[in-house]
Image (spheres, rainbow, N blue to C red):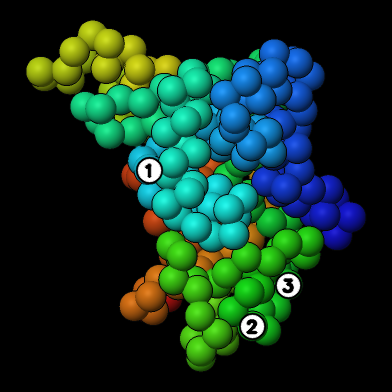
Amino acid sequence: MLEFQIEIEKLFSKNQLMPRIRAEFQSEPEFEKQMIDNDIDVDFGYDLLAQMVLHKRAHLPTLVGALRKHFEGDCQKTTDELLNAAMADLVDWSPVARQFIVKYGISVDVQADLDRFQYPLPMVVEPKELKNNRDTGYFTSQNSAILRQNHHDEDICLDHLNKVNRIRFRINQQVALTIKNRWKNLDKPKPDEEEGEYKKRVKAFEKYDRTSKDVLDMLGVSTGGEFYLTHKVDKRGRTYSQGYHVNYQGADWNKAVIEFAKQEITD
């Protein structure tokens, strides 16, 4: 089972996905020519294209944070290069939304993998014990046990995170088969909702529903298998479950389909 868990983590790892996205663009010589002709650092350019595939839309601080490594952390140089990239049509810029917008996509196969594996997955074995603030519970990756770029190496309550990480869950099959997601509401647009926004909402839910089912089937969770969720804390010490496909802190549907694997009657 540990071997299976490690294979799952390799699928999820963005370090595995980013090279796949870059390779999609590197296989098309015109992208490199476009960068060279416009004096754009090629490595930066490919990373920008890959980041935009992940984000679809991104504000300037988001991209600067992700790409400043190409300029030794210099935020101004990174901003200048992003403007050059927009002028060179590597990415679109919306002055109204003040966001960069993806211009070039990727193949259907790679996008399908992104849809399934770009979010933290449930674990099929007990998470690895957290011993420092860089541990995540996963066996092949380190990140931070603290959310939203607030990492530090001072004391946080790792004992608490380890305790909640050890809780076993399973899918409530009866609820999963009968519940109607209130958020879904796909039969008609909401009041004052434009047709385009309604169609976008339908498409978003259908993708979520499809990819969640695919992932849970792969994990064996949807047929009654047990799983674990990893957790992180924010800078105020509040605990958050790291789940997307299933999450007891998510929407009504997410909460309703999860139950404890070890159940007890309480007074």
What x and y, as percent, mark residue 137? 67, 68
Between tags 2 and 3, which lies in front? 2
Question: Is residue 76 or residue 100 the one in the foreground?
Answer: 76
Q: Is residue 191 positioned above or below 130 on the image?
A: above
Q: Is residue 109 left or right of residue 176?
A: right
> Looking at the rendering, which quadrant does residue 79 occupy?
top left
Q: Which residue lies most toward the right here?
A: 3
The residue identified by callout 3 is: 128
What x and y, as percent, mark residue 62? 43, 47
Q: For the residue labelled by badge 3, is the local secondary structure a helix, a strand or a loop?
A: loop
Q: Is residue 50 positioned above or below 252 on the image?
A: above
Q: For the residue labelled by badge 2, is the local secondary structure a helix, a strand or a loop?
A: loop
Categorize mark 1 by other alpha carbons within 10 Å: few (<14), some (14-19), many (20+). some
The residue identified by callout 2 is: 132
Q: Measuring 63% from the left and 74% from the top, which residue is drawn there?
A: 134
Q: Measuring 53% from the left and 67% from the top, which residue is drawn there?
A: 231
Q: Amino acid at mark 2?
A: Asn
Q: Amino acid at mark 3?
A: Lys
Q: Measuring 71% from the left and 31% from the top, which residue is drawn there?
A: 22
Between tags 1 and 2, which lies in front? 1
Q: Rounded to the nearest whole Å, what is the CA distance between mark 2 and mark 3?
A: 12 Å
| Residue 33 appears in view | yes
The residue identified by callout 1 is: 60
Q: Which residue lies most toward the left here?
A: 192
